[in-house]
Image: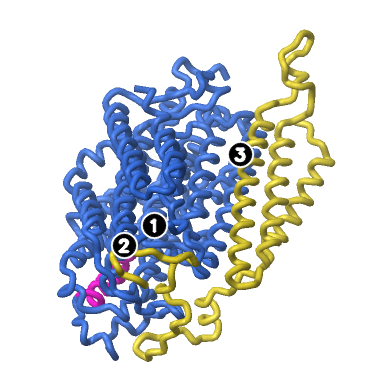
Chain colours: A blue, B yellow
């Protein structure tokens, strides 16, 4: 079974190389890309089953024993993240294939799209299974470099400008991460996460806090936590719709995943839990206030993305088993729902010719299918029962209430308020873009539009295009997956709870790497 | 742990200059800043390796205490390769940016200018600026369409 572990990285990487060689034939490229991600999905599902029933998987790359070689580790959290990411990557791939088939991407340099996409997948999977801090850094670099390519795809002026901000910010965060690895190596003399966990306890607390903050800032930039979130709403919306969908769903969550590992295994202490709670509060509130003021749906969704990262940080900052479990459940829910919303926004853009709510109207009548595909995930993100968003938020609030401090109650109140404001922002989109008759769009007066600001040049109406069945199918598939998260919330939360249990006792993780105990 | 003061000073200077350049507006300077910061970080890893010693080759008469720690050097090599790849990409980006705009500077965000001037467009007052619409072709290469949906 351990043999499966490196395959989740190898398969997409080999797929990327094959797709690059097959650059002349888009059809073969598509086949290779779908095949590679489907294989990863199958392997991931098998691993999730094996990890949950038998025990964690571990692979020493090249046969070098643990503290000297690189280890790949799949525990419950890693397996769950691999499965969800594979589902999302596959759905977005099918969506983009549908878009490419309709618009025609032959002989344009977009033939690098599929290889870059598969390398992005490689980086994401590598980051999830890394048992070594430096390997985690390499995973981050792989996914970041391919995301640089994807965000500037085609090289239009707007994308180069937005991409430059994104790239420079990411470079700074990578350098900070590398510097933190150097400092951690200087302090404990290892980069193996399990061994760091063992040795970090002997380090003076002030040095620990310094290293801890450096890692958190590096990951916080990637996860878009306030005040390090400014780059996200600026850069994501300009990329092509499928790219934005996969970035929004996955890339920030890789940062959150790294924060979970940092908080639970590397620094299991609770010195920074209160500052993290305050940061979570600010991320939630400021993110959603940004969302309320946006007229463009893509920008609006980018701000809700920032805001909902706050919920995950809240769960992590509690430092309890149930808090971590709720955060994991919320991550899974949010990856699926946020991607679905960006995909249906891609459909809205094709149908209505714009993503600005001031220009859209009458979509319910014109495209009832898109209306359903937008409405269900919108309610889900807003936290309406019985969807998974409600379950996730309820679990988070229960975990927070267990703490019982004044700050915890403030966070619960803010969480409920943010959830309502998210719902307000999304329902305004629904009212204006779907419910408002198309003929009312000109000179429309409403309280709903009073406080909305629109960026200059945004919201230009472009040509409406036909919507291929593949795009509808991929989005519908994601909606079904998000509903499945609701139906199977029990088993899913069971896995999350067991993952949270494992994470809050770092010894479990150390045992995976050093079954016989470390000779420290 | 003993630290070489010279390396420490060089690292500090590289970091200072690199961060100064990263904050510049010109993309070429940002690239140079990135290179300096990258090398400063490599030096930091080297400093963390501790005292320099003999080559870490198992041979007669060489004990482990006398050897240099080889792992940080492996980390530095990996980091250099990554920095190299990213700089190549940045140069391509700068060239593309220069091809498009004939200038090297990162432009102001249109949103920020509008916010500063207080001239954000309020919907309903209808002043559309079609200057940078999303309908521009995604590439400068000829777009071939299959469905006859020529743009």
Residue matched to label 3: A181
Q: Main secondary structure of the magenta part?
A: helix
- Give the camera-side residue of A157 and B18: A157
Residue A411 visible in rendering: no
What residue does disc 2 label?
Answer: B146
Circle 3 chain: A
Which residues are the magenta region?
A416-434
Q: Earlier in the sequence, mark 1 or mark 3?
A: 1
| Dot 3: element | helix
| Residue A91 vs residue A73, the one in the foreground | A91
Q: Is residue A45 magenta?
A: no
Task: Please identify the quarter of the rendering in which residue A304 is found.
Answer: bottom left
Mark-to-mark CA distance, 1 and 3 = 43 Å
Label 2 residue SS: loop
Residue A319 in the image, given as x and y percentages of width and height: 41, 42
Tell me if label 1 and label 2 are in contact, CB under 8 Å: yes
Residue drawn at (51%, 38%), measured in percent from left and top?
Answer: A136
């Amino acid at each position: 079974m351990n043999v499966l572990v490196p395959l989740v990285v190898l398969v997409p990487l080999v797929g990327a190389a094959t797709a690059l060689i097959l650059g002349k034939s888009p059809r073969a490229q598509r086949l290779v890309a779908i095949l590679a991600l489907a294989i990863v999905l199958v392997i991931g599902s098998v691993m999730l089953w094996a990890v949950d029933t038998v025990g964690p998987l571990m692979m020493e790359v090249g046969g070098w024993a643990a503290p000297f070689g690189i280890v790949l580790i799949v525990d419950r959290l890693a397996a769950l993240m691999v499965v969800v990411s594979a589902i999302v990557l596959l759905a977005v791939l099918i969506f983009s294939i549908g878009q490419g088939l309709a618009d025609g991407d032959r002989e344009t340099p977009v033939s690098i799209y599929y290889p870059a996409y598969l390398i992005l997948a490689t980086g994401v999977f590598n980051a999830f299974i890394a048992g070594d801090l430096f390997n985690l850094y390499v995973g981050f670099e792989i996914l970041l470099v391919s995301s640089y390519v994807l965000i500037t795809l085609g090289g239009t002026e707007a994308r180069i400008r937005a991409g430059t901000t994104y790239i420079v910010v990411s470079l700074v965060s990578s350098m900070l991460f590398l510097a933190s690895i150097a400092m951690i190596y200087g302090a404990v003399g290892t980069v193996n996460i399990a061994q760091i966990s063992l040795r970090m306890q002997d380090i003076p607390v002030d040095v620990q806090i310094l290293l801890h903050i450096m890692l958190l800032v590096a990951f916080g930039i990637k996860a878009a936590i306030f005040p390090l979130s400014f780059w996200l709403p600026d850069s994501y919306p300009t990329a092509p719709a499928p790219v934005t969908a996969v970035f929004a769903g996955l890339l920030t969550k890789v940062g959150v995943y790294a924060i979970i590992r940092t908080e639970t295994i590397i620094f299991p202490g609770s010195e920074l839990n209160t500052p993290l709670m305050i940061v979570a509060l600010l991320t939630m509130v400021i993110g959603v206030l940004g969302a309320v003021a946006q007229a463009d749906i893509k920008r609006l969704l980018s701000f809700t993305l920032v805001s909902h990262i706050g919920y995950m940080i809240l769960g992590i900052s509690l430092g309890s088993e149930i808090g971590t479990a709720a955060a994991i459940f919320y991550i899974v829910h949010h990856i699926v729902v946020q991607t679905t919303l960006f995909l249906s926004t891609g459909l809205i853009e094709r149908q209505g010719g714009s993503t600005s709510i001031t220009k859209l109207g009458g979509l319910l009548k014109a495209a009832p299918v898109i209306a359903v595909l937008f409405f269900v995930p919108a309610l889900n993100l807003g936290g309406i029962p019985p969807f998974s968003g409600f379950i996730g938020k309820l679990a988070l609030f229960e975990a927070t209430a267990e703490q019982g401090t004044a700050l915890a109650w403030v966070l619960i109140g803010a969480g409920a308020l943010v959830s309502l404001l998210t719902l307000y922002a999304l329902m305004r989109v629904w009212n204006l873009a779907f419910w408002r008759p198309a003929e009312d769009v000109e000179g429309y007066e409403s309280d709903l539009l009073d406080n909305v600001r629109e960026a200059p040049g945004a919201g230009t109406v472009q040509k409406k295009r036909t919507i291929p069945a593949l795009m509808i199918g991929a989005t519908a598939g994601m909606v079904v997956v998000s509903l499945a998260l609701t139906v199977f919330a029990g088993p899913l939360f069971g896995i999350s709870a067991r993952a949270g249990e494992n994470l809050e006792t770092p010894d479990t993780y150390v045992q995976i790497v050093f079954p016989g105990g470390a000779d420290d | 742990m003993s630290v070489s003061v010279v390396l420490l000073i060089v690292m500090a200077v590289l970091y200072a200059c690199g961060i100064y350049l990263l904050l510049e507006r010109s993309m070429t300077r940002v690239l140079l800043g990135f290179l300096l910061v990258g090398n400063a970080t490599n030096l930091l890893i080297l400093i963390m390796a501790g005292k320099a010693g003999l080559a870490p080759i198992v041979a007669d008469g060489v004990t482990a205490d006398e050897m240099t720690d080889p792992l940080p050097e492996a980390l530095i090599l990996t980091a250099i390769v990554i920095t190299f790849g990213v700089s190549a990409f940045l140069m391509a980006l700068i060239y593309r940016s220069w091809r498009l705009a004939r200038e090297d500077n990162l432009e102001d965000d249109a949103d920020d200018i509008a916010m500063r001037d207080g001239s954000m467009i309020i919907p309903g007052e209808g002043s559309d600026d079609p200057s940078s619409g999303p309908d521009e072709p995604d590439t400068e290469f000829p777009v071939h369409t299959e469905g006859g949906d020529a743009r």
